Image (cartoon, rainbow, N blue to C red):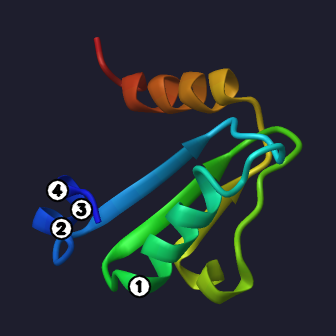
Amino acid sequence: MNTFIKANQDKKLLLLELGVGRMTPMFIQQPFWNLTYNLSQTSYVNINPKDAMTHPKIEDKSLVIHADINTVFADIVNDNNKGIS
């Protein structure tokens, strides 16, 4: 387990998967799923317009967004800027 994860395994962690395709799931997706499953305060978010998915065992700790990353982040920025002058 990497040093950061080990030092923070009892804290709330968010694993954010951005635009990863299905060609090499064993390098990013499966390790993220395993960490989400094994660390009680960890959540997983996957943003991808066509390949967003999660493992059934972590559905309750996951958010899957089928959209373009640029659109998602632009929406977040726009929502946070409402009412700011």
Mark 3: few/some/many CA within 10 Å (<14, 14-19, 20+): few
The residue that appears at 63% across and 33% down in the rendered structure is 72
Answer whether labels 4 and 2 touch (C-beta < 8 Å): yes
Residue picked out by circle 3: 5
Give SS at disc 4.
helix
Q: Could you tell me residue 59's position as x and y percent? A: 65, 80
Badge count: 4
N-terminal label among 1 and 4: 4
Give SS at disc 1.
helix
What is the residue that sits farthest to the top in this orientation? Answer: 85
Left or right, 77 with reference to 65: left
What is the residue that sits farthest to the right in this orientation? Answer: 50
Left or right, 37 with reference to 57: left
Answer whether labels 2 and 3 touch (C-beta < 8 Å): yes
Residue picked out by circle 4: 3
In which image quadrant can residue 3 be found? bottom left
